[in-house]
Image: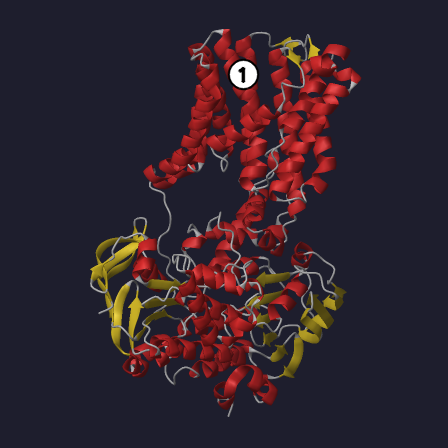
């Protein structure tokens, strides 16, 4: 197991958010974490990164305990996070943003090589390397965020809502790029509201409800599970059935 | 019990304060200690102004001593040269300082951050030079022979009486400060501190409120200066030097910038501490120890000493933050009807040949479309197509290069955000702009700013009735219930999950009772069931007669809700029409939708 959470409870101040959560990732797989707003998904990622206080339980990375370690040493151990809403350095260029991703490395040649790797993966970023991050479109910003996080060649990548605010076509592209990361040997834990898109590229998934793991399994099984469909995939009829239901509600409420 | 103790907090603070003020002259009856108390009180009067402008509104106006100087010199000259009654001279000095603050307020408070700090210090420096150079200010020697304080001939020559008088004025200043802090203007000031853009979106006139606080703070600083010169019996340009400004700001920060009481407490602490150190007779070390203690206090109590005690009290009294918020059923709402009902046969919003470039990038280029009154209109297009820019142009956040925007037939393209809001256009932002220094309920109460008609003077002097605030609170609670956040009133918005924060912002926008609601990606960060719930909410908003213009990437929501869809790409209009028309448009499929979504149209 590359990452193991063993009965983790964690939260802010005196209010616990996660209750005895156990979760594991094997090297080379994509695991999706889905659940409603407030279920504790982002808190779980922040707990792994050491940004939230763990009250009980153990976190192991590659067999070694990392519970309650300071964030920089967790990053050095090989875990990188792409935070919710990207959080780029807006007034820095793309290249500067990417170089910040290798901030902990003092090997300049390795940094340049890592930069080159990102430009091969995301050719559009090479074209725009001098452009300020805040002038990029949402999809490009998400690419920069992922590229920045992978600059340090992490062994595990934590993605928080990569599809947030992206156009449908761009969501598909970003998800393909995440799948490509896994195919190149990377390991990814992805938190998504867009459960449909995340489970489509994931190997396995967990469903978090009120800070507890409610369901887990192969991604295909979860996609097919009536309980998951009902709660997270648009209910009966699947992802696109929502549109029809909205239309009938509109007829009922607005009469048109 | 808990509620009782929490409600009584201001009364308990005032009681402790009154007891301390009454007892002090008996405990320290000698003139030296009374003198310390008088200087502390004089400074405490002006800290209230610092709290209002720096603490609540986060405006780095730090040259308050300039106004103390106006008051001090006005008193010195009027009393010594013209034999005025000191109390009348004090009021005259306050009026002069307030007039000065009013005249220079608007231009100077347009500045922000360190530039504002520099400008206010420059004003102070200018007055020092004026005091040195002018013939009637006594030059570097200043004015001497200032009489002891008296009120209409009733002498306060007794130090104990003067001490009580000074602290009575502190009480009055704090009371004025508390009246403002708890009012709609207090909320507006906090809103300005958190996000001036969002404050504008709910109709807050930030320059006006900043100038009001500058004027009130200037008056208080002037009174403070008057009291000080009557105590010292003399004044010269060094009395109100930079050291005075720095002590004032430091004292306020130590006491607690976010609370009106904090300033008064801080003034007492800093003056007391300085005298204590003087007693040690280590002139060399005085400043060093003072600085070190200040830093220490700020590290241990980042919200100041008053902030620390206030929180500790809340915790002991059983108050605290709301940790988990459960979304409730969508509630009913009865927003009072707007004065003019929207005409349903005409467009409520007309965007006409609007263009805006950033350098060589044409972000919005010759875009024209109409939004029919009562409709749900969607604006879609790839990331970077210019949708958010267009929203910002409509909302007045950005000036447009060319074109017109008409709202209910009136041109609004030249209006600032606040006036756009006052016309009845509300906004929710793509990157949430909640006021993170207020509770959820207060955030929503800010949405009704345009209905709060009470002026600053009635509020400051306690004449403003409570009824309007009660109505604002009731509507805010109703708006929270409408979006399904009943029970979240006292929560800290930053502690809520992203999706719930969106609902708070929506409630705040609805509290404005808008005729047109602009929503920028409301479904981003929501899962499927939450998205479905949001769409029901939007339908219920439309059913209230509010026109909705929405930017969104979730095509299920757009195609399910919209009466009319406008498609943008690369800053230009690409397509426009009904949902069925747009989703079959090959250009739209290629640039935006992709094949899968289009295929669902069949």
- Observer-nearest residue: B67 or B560? B67
Q: Is residue A40 visible?
A: no
| Number of residue marks | 1
Q: Residue furthest front?
A: A109
A54 left or right of B531 in image: left
Q: Is residue B566 above or below residue B61?
A: below
Picture coordinates of residue B453, whole percent (x, y): 65, 46
Q: Which quadrant does the N terminus of chain A fall into?
A: bottom left
Q: Residues within 10 Å of mark 1 (few under 14, many from 20)?
A: many
Which element type, helix, strand or loop, lies under badge 1? helix
- Observer-nearest residue: B144 or B347? B144
A211 left or right of B482 in image: left
Q: Which quadrant does the C terminus of chain A fall into?
A: bottom right
- Observer-nearest residue: B454 or B216? B216
Q: Which quarter of the figure has residue A46? A: bottom left
Q: Residue furthest bottom?
A: B602
Q: Which quarter of the figure has residue B84? A: top right
Q: Is residue B118 visible?
A: yes
Q: Residue at x 56, y 86 (%)?
A: B590
Residue underneath mark 1? B38
Provide the chain ID for the residue under circle 1: B
Picture coordinates of residue B499, whole percent (x, y): 44, 64
Q: Residue furthest right?
A: B135
Q: Which quarter of the figure has residue B454? A: top right
Q: Is residue B399 above or below residue B175?
A: below
Picture coordinates of residue B239, whole percent (x, y): 62, 18
Q: Residue at x 40, y 54 (%)?
A: B495
Picture coordinates of residue B393, whole percent (x, y): 67, 64
B44 left or right of A178 in image: right
Q: Residue at x 44, y 14 (%)?
A: B282
């Amino acid at each position: 197991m590359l990452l193991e959470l063993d009965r983790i409870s964690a939260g802010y101040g005196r209010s616990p958010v996660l209750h005895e959560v156990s979760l594991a990732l094997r090297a080379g797989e994509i695991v999706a974490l889905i659940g409603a707003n407030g279920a504790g998904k982002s808190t779980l990622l922040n707990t792994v990164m050491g940004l939230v206080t763990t009250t009980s339980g153990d976190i192991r990375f590659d067999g070694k305990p990392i519970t309650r370690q300071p964030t920089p040493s967790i990053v050095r151990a090989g875990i990188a996070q792409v935070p919710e809403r990207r959080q780029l350095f807006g007034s820095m260029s793309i290249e500067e943003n990417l170089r910040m991703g290798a901030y902990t490395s003092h090997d300049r040649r390795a940094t340049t090589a890592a930069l080159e790797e990102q430009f091969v993966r995301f050719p559009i970023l090479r074209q725009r390397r001098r452009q300020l991050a805040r002038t990029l479109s949402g999809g490009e910003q998400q690419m920069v965020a992922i590229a920045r996080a992978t600059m340090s060649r992490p062994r595990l990548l934590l993605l928080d809502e990569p599809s947030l605010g992206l156009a449908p076509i761009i969501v598909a592209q970003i998800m393909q790029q995440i799948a490509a990361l896994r195919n190149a040997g990377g390991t990814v834990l992805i938190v998504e509201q867009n459960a449909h898109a995340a489970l489509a590229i994931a190997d396995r998934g967990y469903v978090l409800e009120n800070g507890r793991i409610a369901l887990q399994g192969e991604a295909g099984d979860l996609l097919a599970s009536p309980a998951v469909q009902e709660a997270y995939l648009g209910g009966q009829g699947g992802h696109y059935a929502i549109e029809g239901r909205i239309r009938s509600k509109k007829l009922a409420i607005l009469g048109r | 019990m808990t509620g009782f103790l929490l409600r009584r907090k201001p009364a308990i603070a005032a009681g402790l304060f009154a007891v301390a003020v009454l007892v002090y002259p008996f405990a320290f009856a000698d003139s030296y200690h009374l003198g310390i108390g008088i200087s502390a009180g004089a400074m405490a009067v002006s800290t209230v102004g610092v709290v209002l402008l720096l603490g609540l509104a986060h405006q780095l106006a730090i040259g308050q001593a300039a106004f103390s100087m106006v008051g001090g010199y006005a008193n010195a000259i009027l009393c010594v040269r013209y034999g005025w009654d000191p109390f009348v001279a004090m009021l005259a000095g306050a009026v002069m300082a307030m007039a000065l603050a009013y005249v220079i307020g608007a231009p100077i408070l347009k500045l922000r951050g360190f530039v504002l700090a520099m400008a206010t210090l420059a004003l102070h420096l200018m007055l020092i030079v004026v005091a040195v150079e002018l013939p009637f200010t006594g030059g570097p020697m200043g004015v001497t022979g200032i009489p002891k304080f008296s009120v209409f001939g009733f002498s306060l020559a007794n130090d104990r009486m003067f001490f009580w008088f000074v602290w009575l004025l502190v009480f009055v200043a704090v009371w004025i400060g508390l009246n403002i802090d708890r009012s709609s203007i207090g909320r507006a000031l906090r809103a300005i501190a958190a996000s001036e853009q969002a404050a504008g979106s709910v109709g807050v006139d930030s320059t006006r409120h900043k100038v009001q606080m500058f004027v009130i703070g200037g008056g208080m600083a002037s009174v403070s200066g008057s009291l000080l010169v009557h105590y010292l019996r003399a004044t010269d340009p060094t009395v109100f030097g930079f050291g005075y400004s720095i002590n004032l700001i430091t004292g306020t920060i130590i006491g607690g910038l976010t609370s009106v009481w904090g300033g008064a407490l801080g003034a007492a602490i800093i003056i007391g501490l300085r005298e204590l150190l003087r007693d040690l007779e280590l002139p060399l070390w005085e400043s060093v120890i003072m600085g070190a203690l200040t830093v220490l206090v700020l590290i241990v109590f980042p919200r100041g000493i008053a902030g620390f005690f206030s929180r500790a009290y809340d915790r002991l009294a059983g108050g605290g933050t709301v940790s988990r918020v459960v979304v409730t059923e969508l509630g009913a709402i009865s927003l009072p009807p707007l004065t003019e009902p929207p005409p349903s046969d005409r467009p409520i919003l007309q965007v006409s040949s609007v263009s805006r470039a950033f350098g060589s990038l044409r972000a919005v280029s010759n875009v024209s479309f109409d939004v029919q009154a009562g409709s749900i209109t969607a604006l879609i297009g790839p990331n970077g197509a210019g949708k958010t820019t267009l929203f910002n142009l409509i909302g007045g956040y950005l000036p447009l290069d060319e074109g017109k925007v008409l709202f209910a037939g009136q041109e609004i393209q030249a209006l600032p955000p606040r006036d756009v809001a006052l016309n009845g256009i509300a906004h929710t932002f793509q990157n949430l702009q909640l006021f993170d220094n207020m509770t959820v309920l207060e955030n929503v109460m800010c949405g009704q700013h345009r209905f709060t008609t009470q002026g600053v003077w009635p509020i400051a002097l306690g004449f403003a009735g409570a009824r309007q605030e009660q109505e604002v609170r009731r509507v805010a609670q109703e708006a929270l219930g409408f979006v399904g956040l009943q029970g979240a009133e006292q929560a800290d918005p930053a502690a809520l999950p992203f999706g719930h924060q969106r609902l708070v912002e929506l409630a705040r926008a609805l509290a404005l009772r808008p005729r047109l609601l602009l929503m920028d990606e409301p479904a981003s960060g929501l899962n499927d069931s939450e998205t479905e719930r949001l769409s029901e909410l939007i339908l219920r908003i439309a059913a209230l007669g509010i026109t909705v213009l929405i930017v969104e990437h979730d095509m299920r929501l757009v195609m399910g809700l919209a009466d009319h869809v406008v498609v943008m790409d690369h800053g230009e209009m690409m397509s426009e029409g009904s949902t069925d028309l747009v989703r079959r448009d090959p250009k739209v499929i290629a640039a935006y939708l992709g094949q899968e979504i289009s295929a669902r149209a069949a």
